[in-house]
Image (cartoon, grey):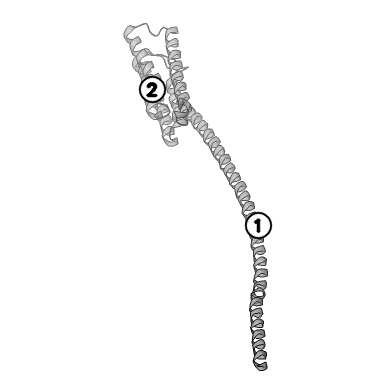
Amino acid sequence: MTRAAESPPGSGTVNRSRVADVLVVLTVWAIYVALAVLQDRFSAGTLSVLTLTLVTVSSAALLWRRTQPITVTTVTVVCDCVIVVSTGWQGYGLQTMLALYAAGRHGRARTAWIAAVAAGLFYATATPIIHLVTGAGPRNSGSLGWFVPLLLVGAGRLMRLREENAHRKRVALAEEAVRAERRHISRELHDVVAHNISTMQILIGAARTTMDRDSAGAPRAGCRPGRTRAAGSRGRLRHRGRRGGQA
């Protein structure tokens, strides 16, 4: 037996999803590191190690964005804020954006919206505080304002609704195909059974006709030998009586 035959159904889809997740993580990590190198954010040794570690952790957390979207969102938000405190970086929080989108697409609706509101309020309050404490400039291009998490979660919910609607359509088409096949089979069975019943009725009718003919002719055929024997006995008695009279 080949490996393809031994593999359970749906394993190919799962493997493709895992490969896609790994590619997303590597791509996000490479983009973040490339931006850090281009903007010379790895100048200080300690901060470079800390920033690279946080970027790696937040990027690796995206591997679980399908199963634990809220936890991944929390991890990415914390790492993003620590990076802002340590470097004052004004880049994009790409990991957090992807995590919020995953929360809307793969998480529960109520939990995802609560996480979006909490993230928006957190960023709206944390950015000024970080600016006052560290003196770093506000995050312009990469800032997650109070409305951006809502947009990301809303985009994830929209994609999930589209997938659910497509799944419902596929299920409805499959059920309709099953019902059509059942109707076809029932019609075939009806025709076969009706034909067999009609044949049985014809054969039963022919058998009854044959039995009636046989039963009507049987008594006459059975009485003839008895009548012949009775006539012979009477003839013999007459013959004996004639002989006795002559004697």
- The reply to whether residue 163 is visible in this rendering is yes
Q: How many numbered callouts? A: 2
Give 186 or 12, whichever is nearer the viewer. 186
Q: Position of residue 149 (x, y in %)?
A: 45, 27
Quarter occupied by residue 172:
top right
Q: Which mark is residue 215?
A: none
Q: Assess disc 1: are there few (<14), some (14-19) or many (≥20) residues with their C-alpha within 10 Å of its C-alpha.
A: few
Q: Is residue 95 left or right of residue 190?
A: left
Q: Where is residue 112 in the image (x, y as percent from the top left)?
A: 43, 32
As drawn, the residue found furthest toward the front would be 247
The amino acid type found where label 2 is placed reads: Ala
Mark 1 and mark 2: span between their CA atoms?
73 Å
Q: Which residue is drawn at 46% across and 26% down?
A: 2
Q: Where is residue 239 in the image (x, y as percent from the top left)?
A: 67, 87
Look at the numbered disc 2 and give the secondary structure of its residue.
helix
Give 44 or 208, whichever is nearer the viewer. 208
Instruction: Tell me the quadrant of the picture where the C terminus can be found.
Output: bottom right
Give the foreground label among 1 and 2.
1
Which residue has dot 2 on it?
61
Quarter occupied by residue 38:
top left
Quarter occupied by residue 113:
top left
**From the viewer's perspective, is residue 105 above or below residue 192?**
above
**From the viewer's perspective, is residue 238 above or below residue 204?**
below
Q: Which residue is drawn at 60% across and 44% down?
A: 181
The amino acid type found where label 1 is placed reads: Thr
Look at the numbered disc 1 and give the secondary structure of its residue.
helix
Q: Residue 199 carries which label?
A: 1
